[in-house]
Image (cartoon, rainbow, N blue to C red):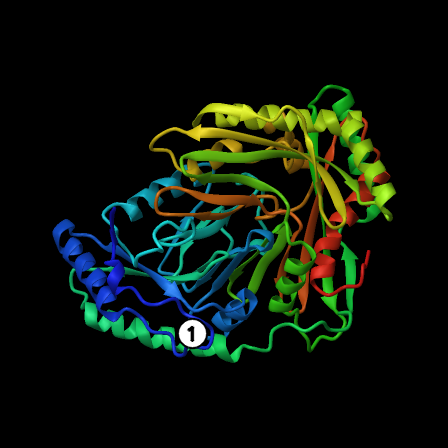
Amino acid sequence: MNVETSDPTKTLNSTRPDQLPFTLDHELLINTFREATIHAKQFHKTILASFTQQFMWHDTIQAFGGARKANLGECFFWEQPEEQTALIGIGAVIRIETNGTTCFTDSASKWRGLMNDAVICYTAGTEHLPGSGPVLFGGFAFDTLSPRTETWSGFPDGLLILPRFLLSYNANYVTLTINCLNQATDLAELQAKQIEEDLSKLQSAIIHNSNIFQEQSTTHFSIYEKRPASEWMNMVAGVAQKIRQASFEKVVLARDIQLTLDDPTETFDISATLQRLREQYPGAYVFSIQRGERFFMGATPERLVLAQDGQIHTMALAGTVRRGETDLEDVQLGEELLQSEKNINEHVIVVAMVREALKNHCTNVRVSATPQLLKLKNVQHLQTPITGDLITGRCILDVLSELHPTPAVGGFPREAALEEIRTTEQLDRGWYAGPLGWIGASGHGEFAVALRSGLVDGNKATLFAGCGIVSSSDSQTEYDESWWKFQVMLRGLGGNNQG
């Protein structure tokens, strides 16, 4: 990997929304492409060229909507509203697709191959932003051994996308990363010309996409439970009985619901959905990844792992109760959760598993002494922060292979719980409850667990929710909990507290 930073005296002034049009550092871009072409001739292989500079600020939803209208390829969206960070990817330079039980290690191997000998150039001041540079975004299936259906066609077991254009936001400014694969015969000037033409198209589409979401009346849709409530609750009772017989300690059972807009001429508004999610759940990871005309999207509260500055940050998240109708009731429910034997036992299992998983890739693993309350709009969870020092040479994908699936989304012991899910649940989870996020050039990055999510396809959507089943689980209570979790996407899609 060859990383260069431009002379600070040549960098552009900070841009503002009223400075149009956007100006690209043409000379530096061409030099980056030229160097990549030289390397391609030298090493007799395709070389990644990546160029980053400052970009104009636009609202993230406006930028995402404009990117989609520019028709430059499939787009992805990733935002942490409270942190004021976001990633928006447009198009695809390369797609790393993997399948089977080795999808994590295969993805890591292909990622390392892509980064080897890459030519990476940053204009001054942009090189230290975690989300700038050649960032790959994607996700992984919950269970590679589970039977797949047409519901998740186009979503392989593992997929990492290097976008052609990446907008990376932090609280202070935005950067644009341009990625290109260079061969020995490529001409840098022609490449730069095409890039500038497409950027002009992108910039124009973003500017004209100024009609940012305005609150609309309730979206009307019908809800269909594919697996009837009574049947699902009987399944929960049966699994709880197996746990009492010591077959395993915990199994997470999921269910899905299908939504269909009442007006067949309408489609779900993806940008409006993201806007609602970011407003209603600012502490969550709000995401959308496009595959063809479908969007896997949601607002998940659960970070799986963050790799930054040589450290791994993760958490155990398990144990749930609803939010109270009043401040007093909310505090009482939180205290009950902290004292609940059922939820504490479920949480302890997750903490132990995460600690052991980090030991394979980290030194000095540290676990907070007691769980904390994570309060979201409609539910509150138990969470315990866990950190460790990443062993030199390891990347975030290596850690993912050990962490996923945690007992919070699978169960414990892992293999016994997964086998029970495969034979009992009768649901193609696809990417639901799988890792979704990004990896940067140095192996840093962040992945969340794709909860509170759904697959949106035109005027239809499939939503998913899961519940942790232990020996003391009550079927009706678990069913009610699943509806609390469905509310995130139901509200996001414009429903009025349906369910």
Identity of the residue drawn at 42% across and 77% down: 19
Left or right of 70 on screen, residue 142: right
Q: Amino acid at mark 1?
A: Leu
Residue 198 x, y percent position in the rendering: 36, 74
Identity of the residue drawn at 45% across and 50% down: 159
Q: Quadrant of residue 310?
A: top left
Most extreme residue toward the left is 42
Is residue 68 depicted above or below 233 in this figure? below
Residue 31 x, y percent position in the rendering: 19, 63
Left or right of 412 on screen, residue 167: left
Residue 302 x, y percent position in the rendering: 61, 42
Q: Quadrant of residue 467?
A: top right
Can I make out residue 416 in this image?
no
Identity of the residue drawn at 25% across and 46% down: 1
Residue 340 x, y percent position in the rendering: 80, 28
Is residue 165 depicted above or below 407 in this figure? below
How would you rate the neighbour count of disc 1 (Cα within 10 Å): few for under 14, some for 14-19, many for 20 or more?
many
Left or right of 277 on screen, residue 361: left
Most extreme residue toward the top is 246
The front one of 51 and 353 is 51
Residue identified by numbered label 1: 202
The front one of 315 and 403 is 315
Left or right of 118 on screen, residue 64: right
Q: Secondary structure at mark 1?
A: helix
Identity of the residue drawn at 57% across and 48% down: 431
Can I make out residue 15 in this image?
yes
